[in-house]
Image: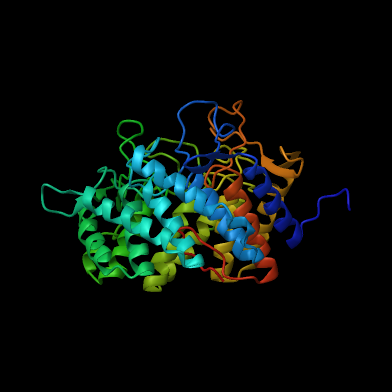
Amino acid sequence: MSVFLEETSLTYLETAKKAFTYIESKKVQTEYGIYWSLDESTDNGAYFDETSIYAGSAGILYFYLQLSKVTNDNRYLKDAKEALRYIQHRWETDRDLQLAISNWAYTSGYSGIGYVLTELYLHTKDTSYSDFVTAIGQEIINQAVKDEAGNGYYWSGAIGVIADSGTLLFLLDTAEKLSIPEWTTFAIEAGRYLLNKGITYPDGGIYYKGVKFGPEGSHFPGFPLGSAGVGYTLLKLYKASGDDQFLAATDGIKEYYEAIAQGDEEALLIPHNVPNDHIYYLGYCGGPAGIVRYFYYYYTLTKNEEYRDFYQKLLKGVLKTGAPDIHSEGYWHTHTQCCGTSGLVDTFIGAYLDTKDPLYLAAAKRSGLQLLGWSRDEPTDSEIIGTKWYQAYSRIDPDQITTAIGYYDGAAGIASSLLHLYQIEEHAFPIQNVLDNPFPVQ
């Protein structure tokens, strides 16, 4: 064995397997099924729910599903039914989820759980998964609140992908995969709530305020929090319905991003907060890694090359900061899917599969090398070596170091991006993209 780090497809795969071993060391068996302890994910403050796709069981199962598919080894799914049993226990006895904008949200609520269980059903054909997904979806519809003005339905009233748009995306996606046309019909009707929410931006275009938190008089442009994510949802509603009102509601989003972008003719960045934030996030939650999803998807629907060109300018902006090798302000020492390096891996892979430009493949591999370099092996309780990642997840408190295991915040998502690099190297397609990632899978 070489004493030097070797970046090969097998290194990616073996590191992902060792991440599985570490995550398994956090498994907790109860009389109601299993979950994974989040004791090293936080400093014991309030955190995302133990069942969520963001930090908990659903996201971990999503990684395990990918690992099982790539290796053709069902051993990685041996506890999936027990995890389902625990999630059902929570549904029946303690349904409210921690830190969820609404119980029906995607990253923090039941839409994310339902999305993962749908994928498990499609892989295993076990109807216990699809039966529970159906129960989730029906309750989502039952809990929808009709807008007083008659414009659609809402759940939290916040319209970002992190909130009600994510719920709409789940309904649309699952309706298609499980052949439930009435969910599509309801999602289209509910989505009309978005149609009158565009706000004129003084310097050009329109924007959507996706969340209710943040400094007074400001808004977040990032994909799950702002205009790109709402715009993406509008495009999905347009595709499902053929109703031009949804497409028309995206008019001005491109001009808004052009107005707030900073950079030069070849490379651009987007501020984390408008109007006066000087910090430029790079990741999914607040930066180009998420925002490009809207521009790519708009391009696929309309073949308008201006949108394809703009998303590439954003990615070149990421590279011009020195990422992934240099951690600028806004690209802290985080390795996560949400705001760190593994999210960049998947974005660069998607851009490469779209454009075939070797620039993006090289960037994905450099990002992968960062993840390999920051991985730390240690014995687990069974003395089998596992891998975890130390990181300053909270970003603005860099002295708080954690080793989270979830999909958006830790090892499960990091290891998934390494699996995707393995698949690229081995031409082992398709890659598994998350619900709101429209980039090619092969």
- The percent coordinates of residue 182 (x first, y second) are 24, 66
Viewer-proximal residue among 236 and 19:
19
- The percent coordinates of residue 52 (x first, y second) are 45, 44
Q: Is residue 254 visible?
A: no
Q: Which quadrant of the view contains residue 36? A: top right
Q: Is residue 235 left or right of residue 188?
A: right
Q: Is residue 316 left or right of residue 383?
A: left
Viewer-proximal residue among 418 and 211:
418
- The percent coordinates of residue 56 (x first, y second) are 50, 43
Q: Which residue sits at x=58%, y=60%?
A: 66
Q: Which quadrant of the view contains residue 364? A: bottom right
**Residue 365, placed above or below residue 4:** below
Q: Is residue 364 visible?
A: yes
- Disc tally is 0
Q: Which residue sits at x=42%, y=57%?
A: 115
Q: Residue furthest front?
A: 31
Colour treatment of the image: rainbow
Viewer-proximal residue among 345 and 178:
178
Q: Is residue 280 left or right of residue 342?
A: left
Quarter of the figure that contains the C terminus: bottom right
**Residue 304, placed above or below residue 280:** below
- The percent coordinates of residue 244 (x first, y second) are 23, 69
Q: Is residue 105 left or right of residue 185?
A: right
